[in-house]
Amino acid sequence: MSRPVMKREIIEESAIRLFATKGLARTTIKDIAAAAGVTEGALYRWYDGKEEMAWKLFNRELDQFTRLVSDVLFDDRMSFDLRLGLAVQTIYDYYQYNSDQFAFILLTQHGFPEDKLLTRETEPMNLAVNFVGEAMGAGEIEPCDADLYAGLLMGVIMQPLVLHRYGKIELSPETPGLVTSACLRMLGFQS
């Protein structure tokens, strides 16, 4: 790996960590440069500014995350409950092993113009709506309002992670299973 590529990776990792901890609005180019150990000018070599950097990094990280979850959710070789359980486990593993990236995705999404976020095919809420809709179509769950139940599903899965991030609860190895059970009950799944 060449030195400029390594420097860019350090800059991007530093930016993600700062966006995840300080927030998009409170993080400055100066903060990112200092955390990466580079000059402010080095950042402008790859990005026009903080907003462009944040948007490109957000898209990259969100696409990686949703690809992982989507690969499990829509693998029709598995039963509905197994796919949901593996997706929840994937999300919780991602949170554990990529906590800065996870917080960046979760917390930064609200710092971008709404029109950019609403047009995404890989937006997690769209994945949840499609998952619920497909499950209804296949008769795996009772008919319901897919948008409402997808929102409820996202809340059940994500809120424990948000509470953990803010030190309100502890997570255990059993947490993903408990969350999956709550999701299945909420969706009216009968095994």
Image (cartoon, rainbow, N blue to C red):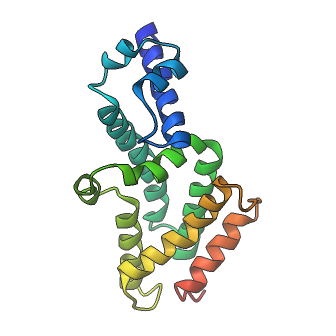
For the C terminus, which image quadrant?
A: bottom right
Residue 39: give x, y in percent of width and height: 43, 11
Which residue is more in the foreground, 134 or 160?
A: 160
Q: Residue at x 64, y 61 (%)?
A: 163
Residue 181 point in image, percent of width and height: 65, 77
- The picture places residue 65, in percent across and down from the top left corner, at 46, 49
Residue found farthest to the top: 3
Q: Outermost residue, front direction?
A: 26
Vertically, is 19 above or below 189? Answer: above
Foreground residue, 31 or 144? 31
Please tell me whether residue 34 is drawn above or below residue 109 in the rendered image. above
Q: Compare residues 37 and 141 and report the one nearer the observer.
A: 37
Task: Examine the image and state in which quarter residue 122 appears.
Answer: bottom left
Q: Is residue 100 left or right of residue 129?
A: right
Instruction: Report the residue at 45% width, 27% height from top.
Output: 12
Percent position of residue 91, x then y: 56, 56
Tell me: residue 89, above or below residue 19.
below
- In the image: residue 67, left or right of residue 121: right
Q: Residue at x 54, y 35 (%)?
A: 17
Q: Give the image quarter of residue 55.
A: top left
